[in-house]
Amino acid sequence: MSKPWISYINPAAVKDEAMRAEFDRCAREGTPRPESQAIRAHVPAVFWSFANSWRDVFKNGVADHGIKELCRIYVSRSVLCEFCGNQRSIKAARQGIVEDDYRDLINFESSSRYDERQKAALAYAEAITWDLPVDDKFWARLHKHFSEPELVEIGYFVALTMGQQRWLRTLGIEHHQILSGTDASMAPGFETADALARSKQAPDYWAKRSAKSQAAE
């Protein structure tokens, strides 16, 4: 098992009962997965800041959860965060997001998989992620589909998850290393450590395709 560049905090060694309960929830529900929280646990304030933001802004909140989930994976595909990109939202799946909905995210504007509201949100995520110029037409598109509170929440969430994903990518963390034995919120083909290893070796693994695409550009 490869080691991360910052050590994991062992959940069994945590004395705070609330933090231990949150680790158990992460293992059970996978939102977020326990490995990333085992890094954040070095600073309890960081641990709780992310846990609370994830609950209040991503899982709950005023904007459609499925749209936020598509934006989250758009960021993963853009910044090549494999840890985050190999997770899925159970809540979004219950709302009707299926695995094929994740496949065209980088080319969302030309894809027939997304409606105009989803495309507008993804354009918002794209502009934030890639620091693209915006104009009156861009904002008119967003205001057509979303209220201002929704735009605040989606924008904040994209900024939060983009920063976290860029950070996690540098840490060398991987799934099934902390509180292993659960497949909560894992993408198909990544449910176990063995399955994850096989999927990442496949020639059509999404991160390999994305890396080649970005290199070509």
Image (cartoon, rainbow, N blue to C red):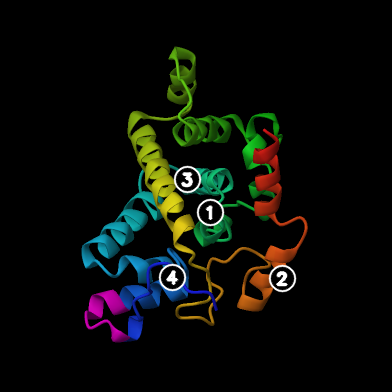
Mark 4 and mark 2 lie on one chain; the one further toward the N terminus is 4
Point out the image quarter for the N terminus. Answer: bottom right
How many angstroms separate mark 3 from mark 2 (CA)? 29 Å
Mark 1 and mark 4 lie on one chain; the one further toward the N terminus is 4
Marking on residue 35: 4
Q: Which residue is mark 3?
A: 68
Mark 3 and mark 1 lie on one chain; the one further toward the N terminus is 3
Q: Nearer the viewer, mark 3 or mark 2?
A: 2
Q: Position of residue 128 (x, y in %)?
A: 44, 33
Q: From this viewpoint, which residue is outermost toward the right? A: 203
How many angstroms separate mark 3 from mark 4 (CA)? 22 Å
Tag 1: amino acid? Cys
Mark 3 and mark 2 lie on one chain; the one further toward the N terminus is 3
Marking on residue 81: 1
Q: From this viewpoint, which residue is outermost toward the top? A: 136
Residue 82, compared with residue 180, is above or below; it is above
Tag 4: amino acid? Glu
**Left or right relative to 41: residue 104:** right
Tag 1's secondary structure? loop
Pointer 3 local density, CA inside 10 Å: few below 14, some 14–19, many at least 20: many
Tag 4's secondary structure? helix
Tag 3's secondary structure? helix
Tag 2's secondary structure? helix
Q: Which residue is mark 2?
A: 198
Specify the quadrant of the image occupied by residue 162: top left
Q: Residue at x 64, y 70 (%)?
A: 196
Q: Residue at x 24, y 76 (%)?
A: 18
Tag 2: amino acid? Arg
Q: Residue at x 46, y 57 (%)?
A: 170
Question: Which is more toward the observer, 216 or 65?
Answer: 216
> What segment is highlighted magenta in the picture?
13-20
